[in-house]
Image (cartoon, grey):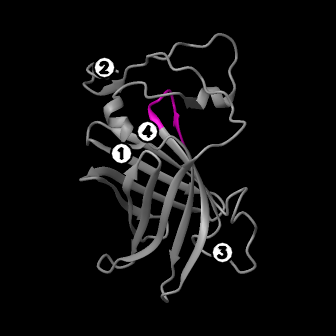
Amino acid sequence: MDTSDAFSQTKGGAHRFATSITPQPGPVSFFQALCASGPTACADKLMLYGQFVGNWEADANWYLPDGTVRQHRWEIHFDWVLEGRAIQDVWITPPRRGPGSSEQSEPWGEFGNQYGTTIRVYDPKIDAWHVTYIDPYSGYQAKLTGRLRGDQIVQEGNGSDGALLRWVFSDISADKFRWHAEISRDGAAWHKALEMFARRCSVSNEAPRPQWVP
């Protein structure tokens, strides 16, 4: 896809994405209005997270401050949204089906029971991504800035509890990635809180995707 005309100039000097998606006749569903089948423009930049579009499962290690390590599983889904201008993903634990999906007898705690979503939007003014995570179950939110550093995607920001955050994608390939979260309460010492090893998987009975017209 040619991205040389990815942005159009407005009178005020700001840039906006050029829309290339053909309007659909008649009413559309919420899914059709939200989801897209690919990037509208600036695909080379948007593929930083676009490479993850699809369905994943992950084994995770949760590192408690007392040195205890608790293992659990996640299901993760990425997709194009907002006419291909953004990426949205959903992170769920315990997974809704399969191994590790049954409720545990002990309390899950901070990283053990989540059904949250992330919106990732590329900002050409800073050549980086605005990353916002929300988990309605716990009320936790995080706002970070994501950039490619070497062969890793490093996201840094703050959680709604005031902690400093560093979330990192690494060891990325077409069918796997590693993700880990580091937390600092004082801005000096960092604690690795969570580590995931994700692998791509298929999901049956997926809803049909809206058509993307380049």
Secondary structure beneath disc 3? Answer: loop
What is the x, y in percent for residue 118?
51, 50
Q: Could you tell whether 47 is left or right of 53 in the image?
A: left
Q: In the picture shown, does residue 13 fall above or below 23?
A: below
Q: Residues within 10 Å of mark 1 (few under 14, many from 20)?
A: many
The residue that mark 4 highlights is 50
The residue at the point 71 percent across, 58 percent down is: 98
Q: Residue at x 24, y 25 (%)?
A: 13
Which label sits in the foreground, 3 or 2?
A: 2
Image: 171 above or below 40:
below
Identity of the residue furthest to the top in this view: 25
Disc 1 target residue:
129
Q: Nearer the viewer, residue 81 or 76?
A: 76
1 or 4: tag closer to the N-terminus: 4
Q: Amino acid at mark 3?
A: Trp
Q: Which residues are magenta?
A: 78-86
Q: Which residue is mark 3?
A: 108
User: Which residue lies under the disc numbered 2?
Assistant: 2
Residue at the extreme bottom of the image, as rendered: 66
> Of marks 1 and 2, which one's residue comes earlier in the chain?
2
Looking at the rendered structure, the kind of residue marked 4 is Gly
Instruction: From this view, report whether residue 30 is shown above or below residue 198.
Output: above
- Residue plotted at (67% across, 59% down): 95
| Amino acid marked by disc 1 | Trp
Question: Residue 52 at what x, y percent from top left?
Answer: 46, 44
Q: Quadrant of the N terminus?
A: top left
Residue positioned 38% across, 52% down in the render = 172
Question: Alpha carbon of mark 1 to alpha carbon of mark 3: how far?
Answer: 31 Å
Q: Earlier in the sequence, mark 1 or mark 3?
A: 3
The relative height of residue 204 versus residue 64 in the rendered view (above or below) is: above
Asked if residue 130 lies left or right of residue 209, the reply is left
